[in-house]
Amino acid sequence: MTAKAAMPPVQPNEVKHPIGAGKMFAWQSRAISIGANLMIFGFLSLYCTDYMGISAGLVGLLLMVSKIFDGFTDLIAGYIVDRTNTKLGRGRPYELCIIGVWLCTWLMFSCPPALSVTLKCVWIFLMYVLVTSIFTTFLNASQTVYMVRAFKHRDQYVAISSYGSIITMLAVVAVNVTLPILTERLATSPQGWSSMALIYAAPLAIIGIMRFIFIKETNDVDAKSDEKVRIKDVILVLKTNKYIYIIALVTLVYNFVLNMGILQYYFRYIVGNIELMGAMAAIQMIAIPLVFIFPKFIKRYSVTALIASGVALVILGYIVNFIAYDNFPLLVVGQIIIGAGNVPMSMMIGLLIIDCAEYNEWKRQPRLEGTMTNINGFAQKVGSAFGAGAMGLLLSTTGYIGAAETQIGSAMTMIRMLNSLIPAGLFVLVLIALRLYKLETQMPVIREENVRNRSAVITGEQ
């Protein structure tokens, strides 16, 4: 993957379309809420194995089954969102799902300890499915749909993906710093886990709903809004748009690694102090200034080139982790490199999905932002499923014993590999896949033709 841009540089006289601080914060409010929720979910395996008495293998199996199911509901949700047409808009009504996310998250960490192992599994599985397969699925499906109807210009999408991410990152870092500390000090019993979950759930549900309250859908990209999306339209797009599958592969690997939840085990058993996770999260804030330079880089380099550069950094970071073993300063260095490399992947994928929707429109097909988003969401859920499942199953097969003070050598080795060489190898596949993504070379022409065609349709209707 070469570093030079496929897209032509932005001209100096290009008109800018500022969003405003208040609207930017309101838009990012749901991202803050979901980002914090993901951090809390990272502790679910530890909660299940060490406080609910469920074996690591069974936990992994439950998470894998639920997320595979979740992946299929993604495709259905995308179709539903693409067919939605209400007075509130197409994507905006689904923002209310954030309330369900936090209610069920709190209930998931409030499983009655007196239940049998079977009933505990049923309880946690149901809450997990409600959060991930229903509420979060519809939030993901409506994300791009809502954004392209709330904002009109590409520079606004870039600003949201870059500058706006600073707000999200700062909030998530705050959760990342405090969560290990509360886990160590408050979550020392099943009741403590419930209290800790509620401490985050109540305020973050309120924060998460702010986007719905303050931002309306005002940009009409549906020149023929009376047309209903049909199943055959979705099938046609799935056959003709190969680029969304490359994006999906990047997302799958990213979420496989992210959802292994291995850091909690690594710091408990390799480093020997789980509270140091909070210190490491705080130190990672030095990577935040990178966000400021991305809008400038996008003017000179393609999004895929930036993502590929980030992937290369991630691979390097995991190699540093392998060398570090239990050396905390060196682990911090590795994690900073990984965090910096993850920034373009976490920030820029949405821009590529919008390009895929523009490509669909250019091919005289429905835009299907919801479907495009949820193909990517399907990959996210499958990656998460196999990440969480693989971690649990691999630990179980190497002799991991939940809540034990120490683990046998084979389990310790697997914990180490899951935090170093295994993810490094997976991200090598991502680098290879990104070399096949060629859509950005066509995007300037595609956008120009789409704007012209929409204007022609509107003029004809008038």
Image (cartoon, rainbow, N blue to C red):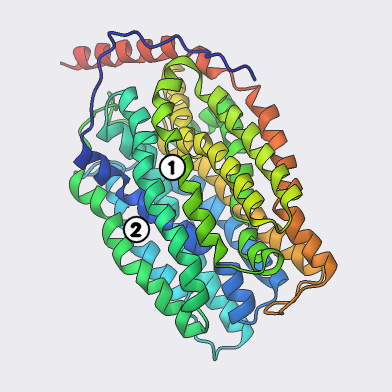
Q: Where 318 sits versus 290, above or below?
A: below
The secondary structure type at the circle numbered 2 is helix
- Horizontal side, residue 332 vs residue 444: left or right: right
The residue wearing badge 1 is: 79
Amino acid residing under circle 1: Tyr
Q: Where is residue 42 in the image (x, y as percent from the top left)?
A: 55, 61
Q: Position of residue 157 (x, y in %)?
A: 35, 30
Label 2 neighbour load within 10 Å: few <14, some 14-19, many 20+: many
Frontmost residue, 35 versus 462: 35
Q: Where is residue 247 in the image (x, y as percent from the top left)?
A: 56, 33
Residue 414 lies in what quarter of the image? bottom right
Residue 207 lies in what quarter of the image? bottom left
Work out whether residue 366 can be spotted.
no
Tally of numbered tags:
2
Q: Position of residue 357 (x, y in %)?
A: 43, 27
Question: Which label sits in the foreground, 2 or 1?
Answer: 2
Q: Where 399 sits versus 382, above or below?
A: below
Residue 340 lies in what quarter of the image? top right
**Disc ID at residue 98:** 2
Residue at image position (29%, 41%) is: 90
Residue at image position (61%, 69%) is: 273
Frontmost residue, 183 versus 381: 183
Amino acid residing under circle 2: Ile
State the quadrant of the C terminus. Answer: top left
Q: Which of marks 2 and 1 is nearer the N terminus?
A: 1
- Horizontal side, residue 264 vs residue 30: left or right: right
Work out whether residue 63 can be spotted.
yes
Q: Quote the CA–CA distance across marks 2 and 1.
A: 20 Å
Residue at image position (39%, 62%) is: 101
- Horizontal side, residue 6 vs residue 148: left or right: right
